[in-house]
C-alpha cells in the first residue's frame, strides 16, 4: 500500500546495538577526522584517552524503527531530509544501547511524504537514557495523499559575519569509508543504483556531511570536548558529491550556535542548523 498516515505513533521492537573501540575509530575516520584529532582516531596515544565524536549517535542510537508500518515506497527515492541528535551523556568508546523507535509524524509535502522517525536509546549498563535521535526521511513521489502539510519552520541567520568558519575537504572515496559504519545504502556506492535515484554518480551520505559539520562545531564551539555537545539539528538541502569541500559557518547565540554548511560553489547543503552546548 502507499504511505499510511495512520502509522503515526507506531513503535518498533526494542533493539540492542553494541560497538567497540574500533567501531568508534572507524566512524571518526569516516567523517574525516585525522592525525590532528588523535583523541578520536587512536586508542593508545600517550596522555590521550579515546573519546567519541558526538555525531556517532546517528550510528549507535538509531534502530528498532517500524519501517514496515509506513507503507510501500521505492527505496531509491528516499532522501534523508533532516537529522537531530540529543545527548544526555558522553558516548563511551565501547558500550551497548537498547533503542526503541517510533513514527513521530507523517506530513504530505505534495512532491513527497516527510516522515519523522524518533529513537530513544538507553545504556544497558546504567539503564539511563543516553541519547535521542530524530531522522526526517523524505520519500519522493509519495505525497498528495490528502494529509496535513505540517508546521512551517522559521529560521534566520544573523545579519553579520560568522563567529567561526571552518573548511573541510571530502575524499572521492569518502562514502566507501563511511558506509563501513553501517549505512550500506547503494545510493552511495553503486553507480547504477544512483542513476535510478536521478544522480550521475553515487552521492555522499547526508549523515557523513552531518558528521563533518559536527566535527567543526565540536572543535570550534565546544573546545573539542564532547561533554559540552548537547544537541545538534539541521536540514539537508542539497546533495554533496564525494570530493566536494564543506564550508561550515557558525554564529554564536548564548548557549546556542546557528550554523550552515556550503560546498565549494557556495551552494547550501546543510541548513537550519542549531547546536546547543555548555
Image (spheres, grey):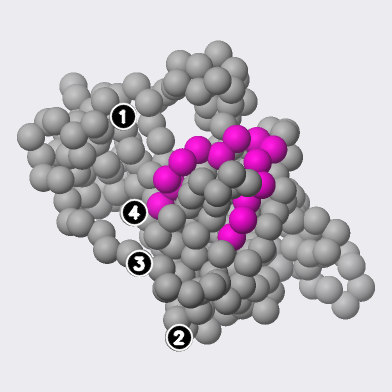
User: 99 above or below 73?
Assistant: below
Q: Position of residue 91 (x, y in %)?
A: 59, 67
For the residues carrying marks 3 and 1, which lies nearer the camera in this image?
3
Q: Position of residue 247 (x, y in %)?
A: 62, 56
Estimate the spatial distance between the alpha carbons at disc 2 and disc 3, rounded to whole Å.
16 Å
> Mark 1 sits on what residue?
140
Q: What stretch is highlighted in magenta?
A: 235-248
N-terminal of the two: label 4 or label 1?
4
Tell me, yes or no, whether the two marked residues, 2 and 1, touch with CB atoms within 8 Å: no
Helix, strand or loop at disc 3?
Answer: loop
N-terminal of the two: label 3 or label 1?
1
> Mark 4 sits on what residue?
118
How packed mark 3 is, by other alpha carbons closer than 10 Å (few <14, some 14-19, many 20 or more), is few
For the residues carrying marks 2 and 3, which lies nearer the camera in this image?
3
N-terminal of the two: label 2 or label 4?
4
Helix, strand or loop at disc 1?
Answer: strand
**Residue 274 on the magenta span:** no
Residue at 40% in and 52% down = 235
Estimate the spatial distance between the alpha carbons at disc 4 and disc 3, rounded to whole Å.
25 Å
For the residues carrying marks 4 and 1, which lies nearer the camera in this image?
1
Q: Residue 156 carries which label?
A: 3
For the residues carrying marks 2 and 4, which lies nearer the camera in this image?
2
For the residues carrying marks 4 and 3, which lies nearer the camera in this image?
3
User: 248 above or below 9?
Assistant: below
Foreground of the two, 52 or 212: 212
Q: Which mark is residue 254?
A: 2
Amino acid at each position: 500500500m502507499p504511505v499510511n498516515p495512520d502509522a503515526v505513533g507506531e513503535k518498533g521492537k526494542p533493539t540492542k546495538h553494541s560497538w567497540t573501540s574500533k567501531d568508534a575509530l572507524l566512524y571518526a575516520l569516516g567523517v574525516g577526522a585525522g592525525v590532528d584529532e588523535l583523541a578520536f582516531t587512536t586508542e593508545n596515544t600517550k596522555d590521550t584517552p579515546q573519546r567519541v565524536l558526538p555525531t556517532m549517535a546517528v550510528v549507535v542510537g538509531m534502530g528498532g524503527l517500524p519501517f514496515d508500518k509506513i507503507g510501500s515506497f521505492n527505496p531509491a527515492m528516499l532522501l534523508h531530509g533532516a537529522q537531530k541528535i540529543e545527548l544526555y551523556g558522553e558516548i563511551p568508546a565501547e558500550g551497548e544501547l537498547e533503542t526503541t523507535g517510533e513514527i513521530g509524524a507523517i506530513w504530505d509535502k505534495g512532491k513527497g511524504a516527510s516522515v519523522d522517525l524518533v529513537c530513544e536509546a538507553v545504556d544497558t549498563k546504567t539503564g539511563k537514557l543516553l541519547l535521542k535521535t530524530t531522522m526526517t526521511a523524505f520519500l519522493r513521489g509519495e505525497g498528495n495523499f490528502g494529509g496535513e502539510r505540517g508546521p512551517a519552520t522559521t529560521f534566520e541567520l544573523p545579519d553579520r559575519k560568522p563567529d567561526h568558519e571552518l573548511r573541510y575537504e571530502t575524499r572521492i572515496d569518502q562514502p566507501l569509508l563511511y558506509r563501513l559504519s553501517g549505512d550500506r545504502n547503494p545510493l552511495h556506492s553503486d553507480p547504477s543504483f544512483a542513476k535510478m535515484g536521478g544522480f550521475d554518480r553515487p552521492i555522499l551520505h547526508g549523515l557523513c556531511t552531518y558528521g563533518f559539520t559536527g566535527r567543526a562545531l565540536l572543535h570550534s564551539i565546544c573546545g573539542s570536548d564532547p561533554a559540552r555537545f548537547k544537541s545538534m539539528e539541521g536540514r539537508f538541502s542539497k546533495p554533496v558529491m564525494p570530493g566536494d569541500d564543506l564550508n561550515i559557518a557558525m554564529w554564536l547565540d548564548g548557549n546556542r550556535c546557528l550554523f550552515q554548511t556550503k560546498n565549494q560553489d557556495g551552494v547550501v547543503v546543510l541548513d537550519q542548523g542549531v547546536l546547543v552546548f555548555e
